[in-house]
Image (cartoon, rainbow, N blue to C red):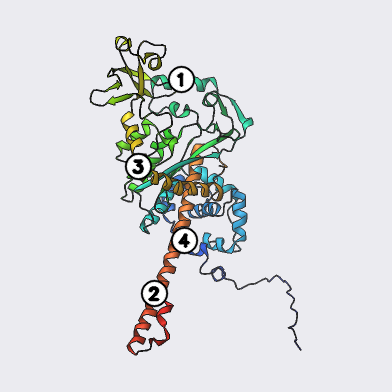
Amino acid sequence: MYISAMQGQKTYREKFFVNFHLSERVPEGNFYRRLKSSLDLEYLRALTKDYYGIEGQKSIDPVVFFKLMLVGYLENICSDRKIIEQCSLRMDVLYFLGYDIDEPLPWHSTLSRTRKLFGEEVFLDFFRDILRKCVEKGLVNGKTQAVDSAFIKANASMDSLAERELAEKSKKYFDSVTESEDSPSEEKKPSSKGGGDGDYNDRHASKTDPDARLSCKRGKAMALNHLGIISVDSESHIICGATVDYADKRDSQTVESIVGQTIDNLGENGMDVEEVLADTNYSSGEAYKYLAGRNIKACIPVCGSYKARRDGFSYDKEEDCYICGKGVKLAFKGITRLKGRATTGRMYCSNAGDCRGCPLKAQCCKNKNHKRIDHSSDKPYYDEAYERMRTSGGRRKMCLRSATVEPVLGTLLNFRRMKKVYTIGQEQARKQILMAAAAYNLKKLMNAMRFKDVKSAVNAAKAALLEGISALDRFGLLKYKIPAMI
């Protein structure tokens, strides 16, 4: 006969006094416990000292602020109020923050005010510190960088669009005429990207967030967005650069900003960027020229409108002319503006007399009495990229790019609260993408450190086992096939 145990019943009674230690309740292998022992943020107090005065009430500890921000991005919590609420319910997070269970956390509005208080350079230094830790652990190679961008929803609705003020239009026109070096006119009047109406963005702006731009992906509805751009190390998928630009800019117009920041970030760690991988949207003469000036190999396929070859014509680099199949030369005539593009081109024309008796004139010259060919002023850079990407190595680089930066970008958008920014302005958006990238890198760093600890333990156990086997071997006790356990 089977007799079961007595049924238990749990009764809850609150105690006035409890002998409780938070550190004893958090497991040794907990992520936030390991993060607390590995992450030293004491330098942030000296870094943010100039943002505070010497009088008034004490504000939130900068170290606590950045830890709260990290929790928000690691847990994909978009609301400051929810961050405080979730942290107050998690013993492991309280231990990471340095708070006991009976200590009240900072008010949620303090997070928003502190985020606005600190300059962008503080968040960039924080991102660089995490990147430096990744470099020290050998996670970053740095030589090959994959670049890509994605739209990030702005904190503004379509109903907030209104016509720009006349004074703003006048200032923009004045800046464009005088070509002022500190004028944002060239940045605020870019070509449309992804189906966005560039002319409409020139005439209208959001009253809520003037830095947001009307844009969309193909087949999607128009929305007010920012353009988030990242640069990812191809070897370990560590983010080496992150920034935000106007959403109606072409990707090719952002190469200098993202690659320049990446060069600075890695330069602080003694690393150089040798090649950049990007898709066709980043193809432009300016982008190729910038990368060539930095001695960086551009693995970027040329845009579809570029023609590397002209049917029936060959290009002579030495004489700088085109030669048709009949031997007629099309000489260089001058610089022209390429149709539908903001860049300049070189114009080559034949003489009317050379084409007069040609049997192919009607087909070649159409309704003109001479043949004209235009090509980009940056043709040497386009040709170099075209030939490079036609090789098997170039095709492998494109596969590497898609397997590197696209998963990272998807992780930031879906799991690191970067699908939408909940702040106003481009500067605040840059702070958010830097924090999201830092949280992503930190998670990769902690996983790598844990894997190394497990691997070292396995290697130690294996070494001990081999030592034991060698001892048994001396006594001739290997008949039990112990080597099969290795």
Residue 270 vs residue 97: left or right? left
Measured Cα–Cα span from mark 4 to mark 3: 36 Å
Residue drawn at (62%, 60%), measured in percent from left and top?
A: 89
Q: Which one is in front in this view, the residue at disc 1 or the one at disc 3?
A: 3
Q: Read off the residue under disc 2.
A: 460
Which labelled disc corresponds to residue 173?
1
Q: Read off the residue under disc 4.
A: 447
Q: Earlier in the sequence, mark 2 or mark 4?
A: 4
Q: Which one is in front in this view, the residue at disc 1 or the one at disc 2?
A: 2
Q: As drawn, which residue projects farthest toward the left?
A: 318
Dot 3 surroundings within 10 Å: few (below 14), some, or many (20 or more)?
A: few
Of residues 471 and 92, the one drawn nearer to the viewer in this rendering:
471
Where residue 130 sits in the image (x, y, percent)? 42, 53
Residue 482 vs residue 104: left or right? left
Q: Which one is in front in this view, the residue at disc 4 or the one at disc 3?
A: 3
Q: Read off the residue under disc 3.
A: 391
Task: Please say whether residue 435 is visible from this viewpoint.
Answer: no
Of residues 13 and 373, the one drawn nearer to the viewer in this rendering:
373
Q: Earlier in the sequence, mark 4 or mark 3?
A: 3
